[in-house]
């Protein structure tokens, strides 16, 4: 009969949080590997379970030396139950190396799911929990470097921290991520003195300076969304999708305009889709109309006020081209029919 490795979820604080399946596996397991034998006996007493299997310690200090014996027991057909002090094994607790060794040896790995401080703190925090990242315990040295690497992380972040280092950790987090970043400190989850403190990193740092005790889980909100950062090709694709949906590309409903700042059309919009520049505003009409000079049909200069199409002057809006008779009044000729049709001149005017 092939052996197996069972990962058991231990309660965080309330023994009643575990179900009857864990009780059954504890009573039937051939080997019980645990972090602390005293915690194991206390849990068995609270659950009213009598186990007959062999008990071995399995924690960070001895796990490397325990692996060969535990793998050999599973290969011999025995069931090994791995329990930590609280929560699920392998999640910032011993278990990963044993799971890897069992997988490489071809041993079945299964679990009896139980409580987890990560998901419990995330659920009660009130921060977005659709996407999150678990960072484990913060390093004792180089905390600000770790926070700097996470400054642009958009997902909610979950950390474990010891109570006597919490105040310094919150000060470092506020210095790097900002005093106003929302955060939650969960203390002693599911236990008698459970406490959930919500606020900002700055306010929580002041609160923790007075001293904190118990098991700590820190939840920090992700970085706020910034302006859209699209390449020219991506922006062109967005424009095409917006137009296909029947929305003009330059309306505020476009994705790049819903961000905090719109990219400059001159730098990001393809030239084929740029809006033509607006025509310059017409110059204000001068009190004295512009003058232009031309030669009359007799070769003498003739000055017309407001004559169109001459020089660099352009007609103003609403201008109507005058008749030939009206145009000739500025040359001293008497009003009358067009010279080309005057009687007695022998036919059409030659030019």
Image: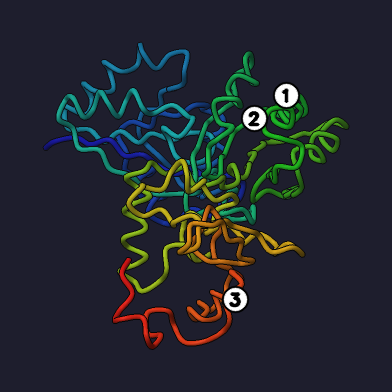
Would you call the spot at circle 3 few (<14 residues within 10 Å), some (14-19), or many (20 or more)?
A: few
Quadrant the C terminus occupies = bottom left
Instruction: Decide if residue 45 is in sight here.
Output: no
Query: Dot 1 lies on which element?
Result: helix
In this rendering, the answer to whether 58 lies above or below 47 is above
Q: Residue at x 53, y 35 (%)?
A: 41
Q: Circle 2 sits on which residue?
A: 161
C-alpha span from label 3 to label 2: 98 Å
Mark 3 and mark 2 lie on one chain; the one further toward the N terminus is: 2
Q: Considering depth in this image, is 218 or 88 the residue closer to the camera?
A: 218
Instruction: Decide if residue 268 is in sight here.
Output: yes
Q: Considering depth in this image, is 271 or 337 the residue closer to the camera?
A: 337
Q: Considering depth in this image, is 225 or 192 the residue closer to the camera?
A: 225
State the image coordinates of residue 273 (x, y, percent, origin top left).
Answer: 36, 55
Residue that sits furthest to the left in the current view: 1
Circles 1 and 2: CB atoms closer than 8 Å: yes
Which mark, residue 165? 1
- As drawn, is 8 to the left or to the right of 100? right
Q: Circle 3 sits on which residue?
A: 329
State the image coordinates of residue 6 (x, y, percent, origin top left).
Answer: 31, 39
Q: Residue at x 35, y 16 (%)?
A: 66
Quadrant the N terminus occupies = top left
Foreground mark, 1 or 3, reads 3
């Amino acid at each position: 009969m092939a052996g197996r490795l069972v990962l058991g979820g231990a309660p965080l604080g309330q023994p009643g949080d575990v179900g009857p399946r864990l009780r059954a596996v504890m009573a039937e397991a051939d080997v019980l590997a645990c972090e602390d034998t005293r915690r194991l006996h206390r849990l068995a007493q609270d659950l009213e379970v009598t186990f007959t299997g062999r008990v071995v310690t399995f924690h960070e200090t001895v796990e490397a030396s325990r692996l060969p014996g535990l793998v050999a027991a599973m290969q011999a057909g025995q069931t090994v139950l791995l329990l930590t002090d609280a929560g699920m094994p392998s999640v910032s607790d011993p278990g990963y190396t044993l799971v890897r060794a069992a997988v490489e040896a071809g041993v079945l790995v299964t679990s009896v799911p139980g409580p987890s401080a990560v998901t419990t703190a995330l659920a009660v925090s009130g921060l977005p929990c659709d996407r999150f990242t678990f960072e484990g315990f913060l390093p004792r040295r180089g905390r600000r470097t770790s926070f700097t690497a996470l400054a642009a992380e958009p997902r909610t972040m979950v950390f474990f921290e010891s109570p006597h280092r919490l105040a310094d950790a919150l000060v470092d987090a506020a210095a790097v991520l900002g005093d106003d970043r929302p955060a939650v400190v969960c203390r002693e989850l599911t236990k008698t003195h459970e406490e959930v403190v919500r606020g900002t990193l700055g306010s929580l740092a002041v609160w923790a300076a007075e001293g904190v005790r118990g098991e700590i889980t820190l939840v920090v909100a992700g970085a706020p969304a910034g302006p859209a950062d699209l390449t020219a090709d991506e922006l062109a694709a967005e424009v095409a999708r917006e137009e296909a949906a029947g929305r003009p590309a330059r309306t505020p409903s476009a994705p790049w305009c819903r961000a905090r700042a719109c990219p400059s059309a001159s730098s990001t919009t393809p030239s084929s889709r740029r809006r033509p520049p607006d025509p310059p505003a017409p110059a204000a009409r001068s009190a004295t109309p512009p003058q232009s000079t031309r030669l009359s049909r007799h070769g003498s200069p003739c000055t017309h006020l407001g004559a169109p199409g001459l020089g660099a002057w352009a007609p103003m809006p609403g201008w109507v081209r005058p008749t030939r008779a009206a145009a000739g009044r500025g040359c001293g000729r008497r009003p009358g029919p067009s010279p080309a049709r005057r009687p007695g001149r022998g036919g059409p005017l030659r030019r």
